[in-house]
Each structure stands twice: as C-alpha cells, then as structure tokens.
Amino acid sequence: MQIRRPRGVTVPQLMVVTAIGLLGGIYIWQPLILKYKNEKKTEAETPAVTETSGTTNFINGFKRFATTTVGLMAIGIGSTVIFYTTHRLVIKPYLLEKRRLEAEASAEYLFQQEVHSQIGESRPKRSEY
C-alpha cells in the first residue's frame, strides 16, 4: 500500500505531524492502558474459581472480558464492523435500486409528456426540412 504525500507538505512536516499524533494517542490512551495492566496484575494474583460446567465457565469468562478495556474496545470494533457490513450489503443496494427505479419512472414520465405535448406536435416533420 502506498501512502501519498499531499503537495506542499515536506518530509520534516510529515514527521512532526506523525510524532505529534503518536504522542497524542499515547497521552489519550495512557489511562486505559494503565487500567488494563492493573486488571491483569490483579487477575494474576487472585486464584481462579473452577466451574463444573464448561458452558458456565465460558459465559463467566465472556462477562469478565466484556468488562475489561480490551473487551470494550473489541465490542466497539465488532459493532462498527457489523454496522458497516450491514450498510454495505443490505441497505446500500436497496437504496440504489430504489433510486434507479425512481429515475426510470421520472424518465418515462418525461418521455410520455413529450410525446403527448403540443411541442411534440408542432415540430417540423422530416419532409419539411
């Protein structure tokens, strides 16, 4: 994949903007990263409770995962993918088909109006040229 540099932007300017973006991202995500590290540290220190049923263990693990920072980010990314895919595969084709049918109906209406109008009848015939 090739990243194109806009005209007028020099390499040093691009490096500065990249560094500022990276540092800003670290600054913004630092509390969540620290919280995740602390959660993992406390999970490692506490002994795990054994469950008798595999299904119950899976459900409890999923519930714990959904409350962690990484779990919330995974849920956010997953829901975004689902919304995008649904829009791309279901909603957009329906809207395009509806728009095409409306355009065809409008064109048919205009054609019928032209055929039945006085302007169409007052045009000179080919034999009159």
Image: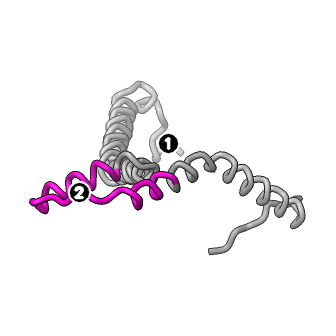
Instruction: Point out the residue furthest to the left here.
Output: 53
Task: Report whether 16 appears left or right of 26.
Answer: right
Q: State which mark lies toward you, 1 or 2.
A: 2
Task: Report whether 101 appears left or right of 10.
Answer: left
Residue occupying the point 56% across, 53% down: 33
Q: CA distance from mark 1 to mark 2?
A: 98 Å
- The front one of 26 and 13 is 26
Residue occupying the point 40% across, 52% down: 71
Q: Image quadrant for the C terminus?
A: top right
Res 64 label: none
Dividing the picture into quarters, in which one does residue 7 lie? bottom right
Instruction: Point out the residue furthest to the bottom here.
Output: 1
Residue located beneath label 1 in the image: 128
Q: Is residue 55 magenta?
A: yes
Residue located beneath label 2 in the image: 49
Q: Position of residue 88 (x, y in %)?
A: 37, 52
